Image (cartoon, rainbow, N blue to C red):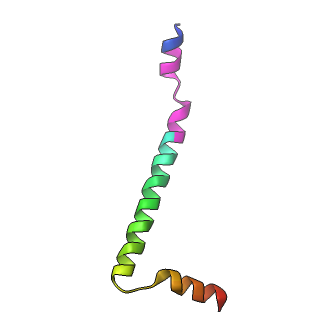
């Protein structure tokens, strides 16, 4: 089998690419949700800070 065919059939990197894509989509979703909450007047970061610091 030629080296090109072996490399083409090797899909070990596909899982990494899928995971990075899913992580990017999750980050975009979190930013969109955070932006929507701020647009509604909710200060999420301030609330979290208040909960953590008392």
Percent position of residue 14, x then y: 50, 35
Q: Which range of residues does the magenta coloring cover?
A: 5-16
- Residue 3 horizontal/vertical position (percent): 54, 11
Q: Residue at x 54, y 33 (%)?
A: 13
x then y, percent, for residue 11: 51, 29
Of all residues, the one furthest to the right in this rendering is 53
Where, by quadrant of the figure, is residue 16 drawn?
top right
Residue at (41% x, 63% y) in the render:
29
Q: Residue at x 46, y 51 (%)?
A: 22
Residue 34 is a magenta residue: no
Q: Is residue 4 above or below residue 46?
A: above
Height in image: 6 above or below 42?
Answer: above
- Residue 10, magenta (yes or no): yes
Most distant residue in the bottom direction: 54
The total of numbered circles placed on residues is 0
Q: Does residue 16 appear to the left or right of 54 in the view shown?
A: left
The quadrant in which the C terminus is found is bottom right
Magenta span: helix, strand or loop, mainly? helix
- The answer to whether residue 9 is above or below residue 28 is above
Query: Compared with residue 15, is residue 51 higher up or lower down, i.e. above or below?
Result: below
């Amino acid at each position: 089998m030629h080296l090109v065919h072996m490399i083409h059939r090797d899909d070990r990197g596909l899982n990494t690419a899928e995971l990075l894509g899913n992580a990017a989509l999750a980050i975009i979703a979190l930013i969109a949700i955070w932006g929507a909450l701020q647009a509604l007047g909710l200060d999420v970061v301030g609330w979290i800070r208040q909960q953590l610091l008392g």
